């Protein structure tokens, strides 16, 4: 049975004179109305058709321009082609081998990478360059629509089961994989985000992560795309984030903890408040109460601060407010604590698989927001996907538990479990306690040495200007209060952790463990 779902044209048809997208660039901004966005999509769809793009073609879209990413992706979907979202980083070549794309659409820098590193060969037959490209051979794709009336966006009819998009995972815990989104998947994600945000007609969304610019207009929101450094979000100038919030009256801020930290610190240093903000959604890594406290100083008292849990393959899954997050710190009798993720969202079903005697196991999720498959990766499907009465059940690779209230708790990645001699440690169980110590920005538990007899090492990043001795004493006190804290064999101070390229929030534990091993050389066999 197939289910028809609303298409992009239906989402964009209403209120053509209202703002769809505000694109910020170093002190300037470009405003695009919904009508202009429809015109742009129409023009691009015609240009794509003229270039030979056909229904079913897979088209890599690689650009840091929020308008180009949005309009090109919409136009491809309207044609029945499949946009493929992938970040320019190590491993792109293997990702494109999985996808075998027919089309490569990107800014000049992406095409230089494609030509130099032979991305997509021999599959790419239609290379199209967006933006200025005077020195690059190949066909230009004009993405800016001329002024004029609003043509109807001719859309190929599709049903909910048809492939709509492929979005690659960040690769922070292994080889990136292409998650398939059917039209029904995208519709489920929009429904879940609508339930989570409760968008109002006058809301303005600040998109702290580039692909969010794709979803904002479909949610009916004016979407502000700040000048984030998308190759290293944590290095973004905070003025480029706070300025647009104030200038455009952003009411919803959606960003990773790394980006939210920039906002909170800048507001704290300058004494700035953000009176228009009614909701902050943190995603990409657990929200710590210290960051929530800092954000609270900048927003109105009745603003909602949410930690949102999900993954590329299932977004969103659950959410929890900062007030409940502070209250949910009680360790279950004989069990693991970790970080509370809140109740699963309506329509989302969470299960714990392979649970031990304490209830700790792998979090698995089913529901309308779940990607049904990985593209051309039957091995990954066999490991992570199974069919149930509630649809595809996806193994997240995250360790967790369900409490008596039906709330999810996060204990870290299954692949990051520390296995010592006669014990195991879940990273989030230790880190959630240590991160709450005074003077600590964040901590990371890594295992050094051979599996099954690893030495648990807690790496500690202090807050700026905090004496090392003070921080170490506070962390030791936190570990003494933790029933498994005595298992930690070493504490190492490090300023700055290696992180994932997408959010700059997920810690690259393999690199950090290598650094810790070098520091402890001679102590560990």
Image: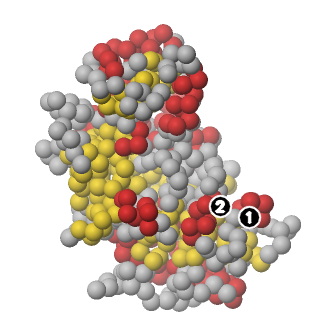
Q: Nearer the viewer, residue 231 or 224?
A: 231
In the rendered image, residue 40, in percent from the top left (x then y), is placed at 62, 78
In the rendered image, residue 408, in percent from the top left (x then y), is placed at 25, 47
Q: Are marks 2 and 1 in contact (CB under 8 Å)?
A: yes
Dot 2: what SS? helix
Q: Nearer the viewer, residue 509 or 522?
A: 522
404 above or below 86?
above
Instruction: State the image quarter where residue 482 is shown.
Output: top left
In the rendered image, residue 435, in percent from the top left (x then y), is placed at 39, 27
User: Mark 1 or mark 2, which is nearer the start of the sequence?
Assistant: 2
In the rendered image, residue 378, in percent from the top left (x then y), is placed at 44, 67
524 above or below 430?
above
Dot 1: what SS? loop
Q: Residue at x 48, y 10 (%)?
A: 469
Tell me if I can see residue 108 in this picture.
no
Tell me if I can see residue 207 in this picture.
yes
Q: Which mark is residue 373?
A: none
Q: Which mark is residue 118?
A: 1
Viewed as shown, does residue 403 lie left or right of 455? left
Q: Residue furthest right?
A: 135
Q: Nearer the viewer, residue 232 or 385?
A: 385
Q: Residue at x 38, y 80 (%)?
A: 161
For the rendered model, the colour scheme is: secondary structure
Q: Residue at x 80, y 67 (%)?
A: 133
Instruction: State the image quarter where residue 400 is shown.
Output: top left
Viewed as shown, does residue 480 lie left or right of 22? left
Looking at the rendered image, the quarter that the N terminus falls into is bottom left
Q: Residue at x 55, y 50 (%)?
A: 502
The local crowd at label 2, few if under 14, some if 14 to 19, many if 20 or more residues have their Cα within 10 Å, is some
Can you identify the residue that label 2 sits on? 93
The local crowd at label 1, few if under 14, some if 14 to 19, many if 20 or more residues have their Cα within 10 Å, is few
CA distance for labels 2 and 1: 8 Å
């Amino acid at each position: 049975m197939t289910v028809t779902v609303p298409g992009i044209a239906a989402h964009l048809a209403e209120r053509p004179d209202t703002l769809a997208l505000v694109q910020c660039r170093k002190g300037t901004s470009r405003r695009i109305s919904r009508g202009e966005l429809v015109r742009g999509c129409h023009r691009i769809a015609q240009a794509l058709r003229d270039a030979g793009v056909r229904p079913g073609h897979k088209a890599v879209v690689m650009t840091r321009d929020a308008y180009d990413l949005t309009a090109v992706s919409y136009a491809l979907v309207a044609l029945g082609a499949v946009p493929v979202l992938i970040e320019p980083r190590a491993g792109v070549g293997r990702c494109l081998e999985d996808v075998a794309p027919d089309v490569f659409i990107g800014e000049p820098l992406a095409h230089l990478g494609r030509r130099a590193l032979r991305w997509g060969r021999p599959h790419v037959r239609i290379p199209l360059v967006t933006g200025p490209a005077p020195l690059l051979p190949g066909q230009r794709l004009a993405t800016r629509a001329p002024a004029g009336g609003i043509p109807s966006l001719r859309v190929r009819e599709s049903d909910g089961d048809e492939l709509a998009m492929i979005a690659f995972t960040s690769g922070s815990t292994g080889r990136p994989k292409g998650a398939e989104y059917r039209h029904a998947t995208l519709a489920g994600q929009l429904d879940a985000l609508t339930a989570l945000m409760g968008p109002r007609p006058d809301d303005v969304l600040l998109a702290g992560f580039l692909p969010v610019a794709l979803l904002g207009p479909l949610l009916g929101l004016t979407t502000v795309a700040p000048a984030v450094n998308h190759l290293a979000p944590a290095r973004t100038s905070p003025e480029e984030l706070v300025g647009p919030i104030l200038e455009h009256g952003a009411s919803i801020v959606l960003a990773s903890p790394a980006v939210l930290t920039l906002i909170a610190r800048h507001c704290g240093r300058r004494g700035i408040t953000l009176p228009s903000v009614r909701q902050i959604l943190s995603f990409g890594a657990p929200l710590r109460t210290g960051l929530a406290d800092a954000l609270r100083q900048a927003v109105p008292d009745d603003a909602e601060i949410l930690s949102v849990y999900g993954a590329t393959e299932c977004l969103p899954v659950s959410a929890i407010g900062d007030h409940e997050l502070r209250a949910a710190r009680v360790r279950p009798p004989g069990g693991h604590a970790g970080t509370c993720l809140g109740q699963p969202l309506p329509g989302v079903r969470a299960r714990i698989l392979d649970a031990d005697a304490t209830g700790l196991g792998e979090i698995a999720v089913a529901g309308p927001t779940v990607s049904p498959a990985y593209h051309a990766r039957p091995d990954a499907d066999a490991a992570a996907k199974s069919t149930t009465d509630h649809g595809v059940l996806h193994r997240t690779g995250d360790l967790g538990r369900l409490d008596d209230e039906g709330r999810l708790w996060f204990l870290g990645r299954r692949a990051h479990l520390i296995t010592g001699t006669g014990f195991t440690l879940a990273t989030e169980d230790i880190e959630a306690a240590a991160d709450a110590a005074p003077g600590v920005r964040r901590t990371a538990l890594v295992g050094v040495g051979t599996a099954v007899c690893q030495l648990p090492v807690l790496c500690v990043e202090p807050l700026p200007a905090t004496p090392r001795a003070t921080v170490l004493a506070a962390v030791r006190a936190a570990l003494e209060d933790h029933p498994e804290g005595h298992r930690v064999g070493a504490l190492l101070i490090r300023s700055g952790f290696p992180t994932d390229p997408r959010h700059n929030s997920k810690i690259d534990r393999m690199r950090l463990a290598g650094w810790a091993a070098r520091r402890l050389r001679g102590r560990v066999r």
